[in-house]
Amino acid sequence: MSELFSEIYNCYFQVIKSLIEQKSTISERELNYRIQSFCFEESILYLLPKLGEKGWGFYEKKDGVLHSRLSKDFYVPLTDLQKSYLKAILSDEKIGLFLDEAKIAQINASLADVEPLFSSEDFYYYDRFADKDDYASPEYKEHFQTILYAIQNRCYVDIIYESRHHRRMHHKYLPCRLEYSIKNDCFRLLAVASRAQERKRVITLNLQRIVAVTATDIVVHKLPDISRLYKRSCYKEPVRVLIKNRRNALERAMLQFANYEKSTRRLNEDTYECLIYYNKETETELLIEILSFGPMLKVVGNETFLRLIKERLIAQHHRTFPSASG
Amino acid sequence: MSEFNELIKSFAKSREYVRDFFVYGFKTRDEFAGWSSRTYDNERRRLESWLSGYVRQEHTGKGKNIYLSIDSNLLDTNPLYRVWKTKSFTDNDIMLHFYILDFLIQSPEKTAEEITDGILTRYGVVFDSQMVRRKCNQYAKEGILHKKRNGREILYCLAPPAKELFAAHPGLRNAVKLYQLSSPLGIIGNTIMDTASFHNDLFRIKHNFFVHTLEDEILLPLLDAIHTQRSVALTIKSTKSDRLLTTEGVPLKIFISTRTGRRYLCLYLPKTKRFTNIRMDAVKKVSVTEPFPEYKSIADKLEKNKASAWGVSFQNDNHQHSEHVRLTLHINELSESHIIKRLNREGKGGTIKRVAPDTFTYEITVFDANEMLPWIRTFTGRILSIDSDCPQLASRFQRDLLTMYHMYFEEKTETSM
């Protein structure tokens, strides 16, 4: 099997390929911009002088414009490693959301000369939730496809949704992204509510609870930046946690909270302070994650979060030591 | 003094640096033990270059503190994949890459000599034909070129473009957008997006641990050993002492936690006839060795056993085959049905019973009950009792609860714990 850490996948190789296949002539200014947006921060210093006649000779300069010396049809075929990866994902149960069985068989036939890189049998997610989405359901597949279409065509969808409390709701949403949770093994739709709302906010809908979805002909020019909307939804004050580095707690906490935007600093020999940013939606999940660490972590702020922790501790103390609690 | 280069020859060293910056994200130069100041400065500069946009810095009393701030929920891809795209190369490597492929697009099925001549004629660059042949053979091994025998000659031609495959199957293109974020070895999916020139405009990921990609070079030979049913010799760095140890065993599966971010290699040790789990980030080197004749029966045994492992432990400290746990919880039946749902979906098939109004028990038998403690703590506030034949479980819970109670309600200073 070929190497993963190979120059074939190097960022410089990729940016040159993408430049060549898109345009046969390019200005230096645009070249600069493209390298800077695709490559690493310092790549431009090394890459730019090399592209012309005095370097690798991929471009020649005429009348202040760079002309590619390579064909506009230039392409790089897939490596066997990449083909093995494609073959591996074709056996995943979620692939049916994208391709029907006939298409899967066709692609498999075109990849007949490689073995799948992995199978689902090679991995065991030992603490994954049991109530995963039903990917095999024809209705689920249809909803999934409609939403993909709506995101790619930037159009509103009409959704009938059943809430956790079995209440049916009917709304128009602009789908922005589908979010897949590895822990829950389910998809959620990240959307913004109908145009009538002045202040946009991200609405999260579980795909499994969508009863019906139809694409509408209301199209927007550009999808909203949901990362910005998400950040705006975070509380101004992060959770402030102290971590005592005993029983490897620091390393465990840093890894477990790697999913959150956070910053950490050392306070003294074995105590660290970690600021974790979160919003209303992730509050309970973060709360129970912090509780799972026991006394290795201490929440010292914000006040609201601290109060939640204290309420649970008081209740538990009362149940475990009723006489001591009075 | 050698010139700074943002590209690197070997991944192993940078793997450690990136991991430390990403996972810990708070170490100043003085705290990176065992590295010279220059090494630290160079590695930091590389990291800042590779991951610009994600590197934050703040000044503390002890110096500049840089860290990676990445919220995986908000990104279209894993920024740490960039680290895999930093392999250094020679001028000849990159020139041959573009000239050979470009020449073969226009003039398919040529010998190494014809390609060498063609590069000279078309691009005005002279190469040794042996060098061209070596590169063509390397690319044939990678699958980029196909080799054909024509009498005594070897002809090289280009494999078909990825774009054809994705144009014929747009669903596959969308699938890659998801899997590059969600599947093991997602970096390869990401390189496919580079090769076929598309990006992810559809998906976000939740509960993914981006740092796992740093172990992908270790994962590849392990998967190879699993598929060919072979043993492996591993070099492991002890997480406690930093010492390098070697061990041999039969790799069976990769155990992944979706909550803690840990990944383990499940290994069968023929000497002790036991299963063990080794943290993937501790494995530094893998050598695939002999076929293991009883692979299938051991793999079947693991399938049966893994259902009784709460996490990654197959034995306990109490010399018992397994340990029984019964939690009794206070759950308001009217307003807290979500807690019952939690027990069902997170409880790994344990039995849930209503024993009195607003009172439920959850029971399970596992190899090592101590592994359940972090999960049990998530029910803090509603635990009425913990009964187990693992005597340490309830006592540890109570001791920790007292410590926490003391920590939150009796300490005076904020930073004391």
Image: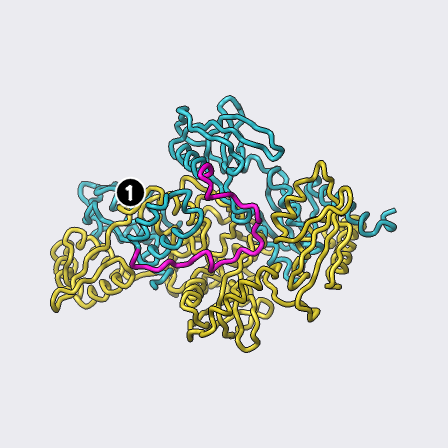
Chain colours: A cyan, B yellow
Q: Residues within 10 Å of mark 1 (few under 14, many from 20)?
A: few
Q: At x 61% / y 48%, what residue is drawn?
A: B345
Quadrant including the N terminus of chain B: bottom left
Q: Position of residue B32 (x, y in %)?
A: 55, 62
Give the residue number, with chain letter if any, for mark 1.
Answer: B167
Q: Which residue is at a point 69% across and 54% down the rendered structure image?
A: B363
Q: Is residue B247 magenta?
A: no
Query: Up-down: is A28 above or below B36?
Result: above
- Principal SS element in the magenta part? loop
* The residue positioned farthest toward the top in the image shown: A196
**Chain of the residue displaying label 1:** B
Element type at mark 1: helix
Quarter where residue A231 is shown: top right
- Image spot of residue B393 (x, y percent): 73, 60
Q: Answer with the quarter of the image where residue B277 lies.
A: bottom right
Residue at 22% of width from left, 42% of height from top? A25
Tell whether B10 sits left or right of B354.
left
Q: Nearer the viewer, residue B340 or A71?
A: B340
The residues colored magenta run A112-140
Q: Can the viewer see residue A60 in this picture?
A: no
Kind of residue indicated by mark 1 = Ala
- Say left or right for A275 vs B167: right
Q: Is residue B227 above or below residue B211?
A: below
For the question of whether residue B301 can be seen, the reply is yes
Q: What is the quadrant of the C terminus of chain B in the image? A: bottom right
Q: Position of residue B305 (x, y in %)?
A: 58, 64
Of B288 and B281, nearer the camera is B288
Residue A118 belongs to magenta span:
yes
- Specify whether B47 is left or right of B163: right
